[in-house]
Structures are given as C-alpha cells and as structure tokens.
Amino acid sequence: MPAKSTFNLDGLPAAIAARFDEAQRSLANHKKNCVALHKLHLQAIEVKSRRRNENILEGEVAFGDVFTDMITRTLPMKKGAFADRIIRFVGSYVKMMNDKNDEGETFASRFVTRLLEWLFQGFKSKNKMIRQRAIQLVIEMMSNIGEIDESTYNHLRDNLIERLCDKEPLVRAHAAIGLSKLVGTEDPEEIRKGEKTCLDLLLECVQYDTAPEVRRAALINLPVTAETLPIIITRTRDTDTLTRKLAYSSVLEPKLGHPRHLTIAQREDITKVGLGDREAVVRVAAGKMITKWLDIAMSEPDPPGLPSHTWAGDDGGIMKGFISFLAYFDVVGPGEVIAVDAMLSVFTTRPALLDAFIFSDDFWADLSPESAVLARVFVDKCIEAKSENRLEEASIPVVTAFAFHIQEAYNAMLSLMQEMDFLHVGEPDDEESEAKEEELAKKELILGELLRIALKLDYMDEIGRRKVFSVVRDMLAHPHLPPGLIEYCLDVLSKILPSERELIRIVVEIIIELRDDDDVEAAIDDNFDGSRSDITQSSRKERSMRRTKNREDMTADEQQESDLTDMRCLVLCIGMLERVNGTFEDNSTLEGVLTDLIVPAVKRKELALREKGLIALGLCCLIARNMAINSFQLFLNQVQTAPEELKLKVLQIVFDLLIMYERDFLGRSEIIVSSQQIISFLIQTLDSEESPAIQCVLCIGMCKLLLSGQVTDSKVLLSLVVTYFSPTTMYNSELKQCLSYFFPVYCYSSRENQNRMRSIFIDAFDIITRIHDDLEDDQKEDPKLVSLHQFGLLMVDWMDMTKLADKVPQPKPTDRNPHAELALDLLMALYDSERSDESRKAFVQILSQLQLFPSKEAGSKLNNRTILKLHILIENLQEVSTGLLRFFLYNVLITALPPAMSLRRRLPRSDLQTLQGSVQKRLWKAPRGY
C-alpha cells in the first residue's frame, strides 16, 4: 500500500491561481513561477488512493482540473497582454516539465495528452476567441511537447486542417502556423490516396486564401525548399503590401541562404519585381535582400570564370565582389537591365562603396561582361550624382586611352567573327558553334558598354576625339557589325560631331560605302577634320546611292546580299533620323537618302524591308511638314492592309504625326483627309480590331490626343469607355492598365472633361447593356466581367467634382455640376418605356451615389433652373412609379432639393413653360408600375 502523502489538495486551486496571477503580470517571473508550479505538480501527483486494487491518481487529476480551469478563464479573452503572457507561461511550463521528464510514459506525457485533448474541444467552439486562443495554446506547446502517441498526433493534425477552413481569418492564420510545425513529420506511406500533406495545404493557403493575414502566416512559416520556392516567389506579387514586404524581409532574405539556390530566372524575377514595386517599403526590403547577396558574393573565394588574382587598387575585394554579384544575373542577355538596377540599389543602400572603386590598367586589360557593366554603371552613377571628382579618383582613363580600349575590344570581336566564318566553311560543329555564339555575345556586350561609357567622357582633348571618331566610324562602316551596337555608335557620333549636318553627312557616306559595288576604300576619304566648317563639309559633291546594277540583273545570291545591305542601311538611316531635330529642308543630303533608299524600300513587297522603309519615312515626315501631309494617306492605307506586326509600327507613326502636326490634321478640314475622317477611321479601327497589341496602341494614341486637348470629340471618349468595359478586352492587361490610369487623370484634370464624360454616359450604358445581353451564361459568370452597377459607380466617381486636381481653376457661376446634369439624364431616361427593369434598377442605384450639393470648394452651386427641372422630372415620375423608385425619389431627391414653389416664382413664365413642355413630351411614353 503506497505511503499516504501529507499534501493537502484543498489548497491546490489557490496555489495554482497565485502562480497564474503572477505570470500574467510580467514575463520576467515566468521561470520562477514555472519552478514553483512544477513543485506543486510533483507534490500533487504523490497524492494517490486505492480503490478495488487499482491506484487512483487523485492528485494528478486534481492538478489537471485546476490547471485547465485556469486556462478556461483565459480562452474567451480578446486581444491583450495578459492573455498572451498566460499562453507563453503555459508553453514555458510544458517545456520545463518535458525537459525534466524525458523517459517513457510519465505524468508529464499524461498531462500534455490530457491538455491537448481538452484544447481540441475549444477548436470547435462557437466563440471565435476561444477557437483562436485554443489554437494559440496548442501552437505554443507544439515545440516542447516531445513525443506523442499516434492517436493524439492524428487528432492534432485533423483538427488543425479543419480549422484551415474556419470563417475567421485569424483562426485560419493560427491554424496555418500550427500546421507548419507538422511539415516533415508525416509518413508518406500512411497518407491516404488523394489526401493532401500539410505542406500541400500550406501552399494552397499561401496562394489562394482570401485574407492577407492568413497568406502572411503561412508564408512566413513555410520551409524554403526547391519545392516551395516557386510558390514563395509568387507572393512578391501579392495584392497586399505587407505580404510582399515580408516575402523579402522575413522569407527570402533570412532563409534563402546563397542566391544560387534560385535559378537565374528566379533571381532576376524577384529583383525586378521587388525594386519595381510601387510601395517604398517593399523596395527597401528587396534592396536589403540584394545587399545581402553582395555580402555573400564578397565572401566567395573567387568569382566564377575569373583569375584568382586581384588587380591593383582593389585591395578590399569590393570590385571583385561586385563582379561575382553581377554573375548572379544574365548580364549578356535581357538580365542586364535587372543587374544594373540591383547594383544601383546597393549603391543607394551603401553609398560609401563608390569610394572604393579604382580602375587600374589591369582591369581594362581583362574585361568580362560583368566587369564592363560594373564600370559603366559606376560612371553613370557618378555623372548622375555630379561627382566628376570621383571619376578622377577612380582613375577612369582619358579619352585617348579609352579610344584604344574600344579599339582593342573591337579588334577582339572582329577576330572572333573571322574565326566563326572559318568554322562555317568546314563541317559545322554544333557545340563549338554554340560556344562561339556565346563568346560573340559577350564581346558585343563588352564593346557596347565601352561605347556607353565613351558617351559620358569629356571630349575637350581633340586628339582623343579624333581617335574615338575614327574607331566608331570604322565600326559603323563594317557590314557585319552587330545591330545592337549601331545605336551606341550613333550616340557617340552625335556627341563628338559639331552639328547634326555633320552627323547626316557621315552616315550618308557610310550608307553609300555599304551600297557601292566598287572599291570603297578608294572612294571614301577616311580623314576627318573636325575643325572644318559645316558648310565646307556639306557642300562637297555627294555621290549617288543608286546601284549600278538593277535588281532584275542580279543573281539570287546577289539579291539576297543586296537586301541585307539595304536592311543595314535602313537601320543606320533610322538611327540617324531619330537623332535629327532640324528640318528636312535644312539638310539637303537627306533628299538622296529619301529618293534612293527609303522610297524604294516602302515599295518593296518584303515585309521587313517595307517596315523599315515606312519607319524611316515616318521619321522624315516628323521633320518635314509638307511631306507629312502628302504621305499621311499612305500610312492610313497601310493600316488597312498591313499585317499585324507592320500595322503596329504604322499606327505609332500615324499618332506621332497627329500629335506633331495638330493644326494641319485635326484643326483644318481643307487638307486631303479631314479631322472628322481621321477620328472616324481611328474609332472604326479600334471597334473592329481583335489584336490585343493593336488595341493597346490605338488606345494609348487616342488617350494622348484626348489628354493634350487636341481631340475633343465625345465619340472618341465613348469608344475608349466601351473598349475598357467590353468583355472582349477583359484579359488585355496592358490595355486595362493604360485606361485605368487615363480615365481618372483625364476627368480629374478638367471640369470640361467631366462634363464630356457625363454627356456619353447614357450612350455608353446602352452599349454595355447590349453587349451583356449578347453574352453566354458562362461568360456572364466570369469574375472579371464588370457589372452594370460597377460600371455606373466608376463613371460616377470619375465625374465627382470633389476629386478635381488642386490646380483646376475655381468654378464659375455658369459651370455645371456633372452629377446634377447626370441626374437629369438618368431621370429623363427613366421615362423610356423600352428600358428593362434591370436598367431602371441600375439607374436608381446610380442616382443614390450622386453628390448634388458638393462642398463650396469643390464645385458650383445648383442654379434654380436645374433644381426646378429636377423637381418637374421627379413629380411626373412619382405619378407613374411605385415601390423602390418612388421611395428613393421622395426620400433622397425631394427632401434634398429646395422647395419648388419658391423657384417657380423666380423663373420667367416662358422658361417655366419650356421646362414643363420638355417633360410632357416624353411623359406619355412612361411605363406604368415599375
């Protein structure tokens, strides 16, 4: 028979309550109270009794009863520090108890099992706070409960999974946290077929839960693995700002480790999205993550693909660290822009790093794509910050020395191109050819970065300027110069040449050289004298661009070579024209380019040549008014017949010409194409076009015309509104983004624009209604479809005078309130007997959103004539309406308007009869009983 304990269980409730009372006051005394509570627990379990040859654990049961009773008092408590401290205290006590009793089945394991089973009942409580607190307690215990039996584990798992579907977001969030602690503990063999694992359920929460707090809770507690990383990356585009921030600051930065755990595409994606986020807090979080990547790169022993030695001046290894950092991105491909943004973010976070850059001769002698990008970004940053002294301290070469670096890079690229030509002559080796192509792309990038640096250098040194000119001109004259370098070469020429006329002359000479079948070296004088006047240079006798052999006399190979040369010449011509600001008449050299190169290309049937020819012609038109007027019909004809790819370019040309020559095309009617014909053509093209890309170009162009005030025709605005709300453009995200920005800017910038929007409301509503009526049932259920009510709310918001921009002039007494005018339009529309009940219901709902009496600062007061007209319309509608409409008319409008009798006395009798007559004419058509 066990010895009888002297511990009195009657004092147990008060003793345990004292421990809980102290624990809820401060976290500092938790350890002391856990020790005291454990002592009470040990004393209590000694109290046992024997009944029918069985030991009754009387003290252990009593302790558990009192303990759960204390927790019961905590569960209903709402947010507060007291309840949170009790939960922490319970977790600490369970941890201490399990640490001291880690063998087999003990009173500790029995206590934990009983406590869990009791808390599981709270998971299903009707009180949301009890459910939330019960899950919090279980989560606090889960890290310290040790081993539990399989039955309790399954019960715990099932209850947490069930709470993932709770209607309260906070309960679901805590359930997700609890479920994350079970990830990896499941036995795949015991999971039934079709049943989801805890990790699968968490991934679904992260992606699909409607509450941002639930997505955040699941995201923060997700393990970062190859399986979960793609889902985690999607949260960098979450609709909730805090979730996007936490994806960087709480998941990717602390948990990812080395950035090479991500693919290059993933690294570029999260960098682009994070640094381009509209919220500053997200950009800062992404910047900190990227700065950590730099720290990791600097700690690496050697950058991949680079020699192990450090060049002179980079004693701290900062520049080499940046090169390793840039290797995380595909700088040779489209990732260059993202890599540059990442570098600029690091410079913003740690500006002192700029002082550590020293570009010695060793650096320029062994350039890689990453080091070339590094040098260019450094120069750009210093120029942007107006820190020219820093460029000198960094030992950036002077122009003459830099010209030799460009020459060396150019020679290296030419040597590689010759090797590739020899390789193609023999039996082709796919692997070797691919390696050479990659190497050529690197050489091209290095040369391009050097040219971009050359654009920022000081050309006071005449010798250096001549040397750069010689190298760049030779590059442009090479028939196989990669097209990506042409723009950079022309930019450098534009800077170092004294005038636009000189630029045109040099480019024309190069074009003649490329097209000439004779010995070009004897025909072109390579010597350049920048001191010679423009007049002398431009007055020299120009050689003709026309070929000595007609196309019909050429062989197939010669025709192909001729076409390639013409394409190269057109690219040069387009680049040149983009940099010309003077008029066509001031540069007579362009006449030959137009006659012998551009016009023949426009007439060609080959799409690529015709496209380049039309672009070049459009650029000529931008600097030649008469040419634009004569060629405009040509571009319109091309829009009607050209394929999609060419139509995009031609439409851009059309809108450029309309904006450039507003008065000639949109302000007069005596030219070849009247302004009304142009507007009708654009509207018809937008209405009939099915290509999303062309729809977007048309909308962008029409938005520009409307915003600039060059077009004021309401039909254009109506077309854009219908396009925006049309189901056919629901998934054209680029168009939606453009118009979502345009409409608020357009309406809030001018009262006239708001009244113009009001004037098209009824027409737009009718068109949208007909479109909705023609939809199939499954199309009407699409969540992206804008309902008639949503359409009305958006339009009403755009016409709100209280949202006008601050710079809009103060209203005049004659200015109309768009909402009041819209109320008149809606009330008159309610007289139409052909309107459906759905339309009338929508009109009533829209009327309830109107602000007829805005603040004095926002808009003008309603004049007596408008108020009386509203009264007359409402009075007659009351005679023919019932139900909701009559209730609304009386309680919303009539009670808000001044008395009509006093207004009738103020208006002349003729005006009053006119108002009443305009209503009576339509009154007989009004339906009855709606």
Image (spheres, rainbow, N blue to C red):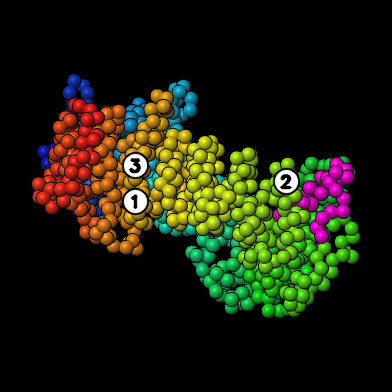
Query: Of the numbered discs in the image, which one, if any, rests on residue 603?
Result: 2
Answer with left or right where residue 189 lies relative to residue 98. Answer: right
Q: Which residue is mark 1?
A: 754
**Mark 2: secondary structure:** helix
Q: Amino acid at mark 1?
A: Gln
Which of the 4 image quarters holds residue 493? Answer: bottom right
Provide the major secondary structure of the magenta segment.
helix
Q: Position of residue 615 (x, y in %)?
A: 65, 52
Q: Position of residue 216 (x, y in %)?
A: 38, 44
Q: Which one is in front, 72 or 651?
A: 651
Magenta stretch contains residue 561 = yes
User: Measuring 11% from the left and 50% from the top, which residue is drawn there?
Assistant: 905
Mark earlier in primary sequence (2, 1): 2
Answer with left or right where residue 824 lies relative to residue 364. Answer: left
Answer with left or right where residue 365 lies relative to residue 278. Answer: right
Query: Of the numbered discs in the image, which one, if any, rests on residue 761?
Result: 3
For the N terminus, the quadrant is top left
Magenta stretch contains residue 359 = no
Q: Position of residue 747 (x, y in %)?
A: 36, 52
Q: Amino acid at mark 2?
A: Lys
Q: Position of residue 617 (x, y in %)?
A: 67, 54
For the C terminus, the quadrant is top left
Disc 1: CA contacts within 10 A as few (<14), some (14-19) or many (>=20): many
